[in-house]
Amino acid sequence: LAADWEGAAPVVVPVLDAKRGHFYFAVYQYGALLAGPFDDSVHKLVGLVDSFPEVLFVGPDASMLESMLSERPGYRIALAARRSPIMSLVRLAAERFRSHGADSDNVSPLYLRASDAEEEAKARQSV
């Protein structure tokens, strides 16, 4: 999501609704990962980017931040996608393959929190 907007602002923050009052987000500066990814509150998000004079929030749920960010000069929300995120993903994967070769066989997704079912099972075990 951030790669689609690289160069549109010095700092780009992709935002996805994680539910339960949290968002999935990361902070990219000039295309490089600066912080994250996170599963945290909007207050944590704003705290991380507060020192930057210009920030562009992107992604399908960025508009959920509009009321909180509207009074901050320099904060913008991209309300549309530039192109298919699939194309950005393919471009990033090809660049990584060229620079690092193939990943090992034990590569897996990065989960920032347990699923609802896992959290419920853990809660039942602690009772």
Image: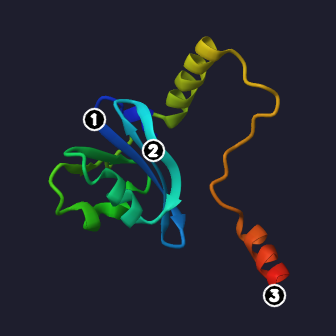
Question: In which quadrant of the rendered image does the C terminus lie?
Answer: bottom right
Instruction: Sort mark 3 into few (<14), some (14-19) or many (20+) by Cα contacts within 10 Å.
Output: few
Amino acid type at mark 1:
Pro
Q: Nearer the viewer, mark 1 or mark 2?
A: 2
- The residue at the far bottom in this view is 127
Amino acid type at mark 2:
Ala
Residue at 25 percent of width and 50 percent of height:
51
Q: Residue 87's x, y, as percent? A: 52, 28
Mark number displayed over residue 35: 2
Contact, mark 1 vs mark 2 (Cβ under 8 Å): no
- The residue at the far right in this view is 125
Contact, mark 1 vs mark 3 (Cβ under 8 Å): no
- 35 lies above or below 19: above
Mark number displayed over residue 127: 3
Q: Secondary structure at mark 2?
A: strand
Q: Secondary structure at mark 1?
A: loop
Q: CA distance from mark 1 to mark 3?
A: 48 Å
Residue on which disc 1 sits: 10
Answer with left or right where residue 65 lies relative to residue 40.
left
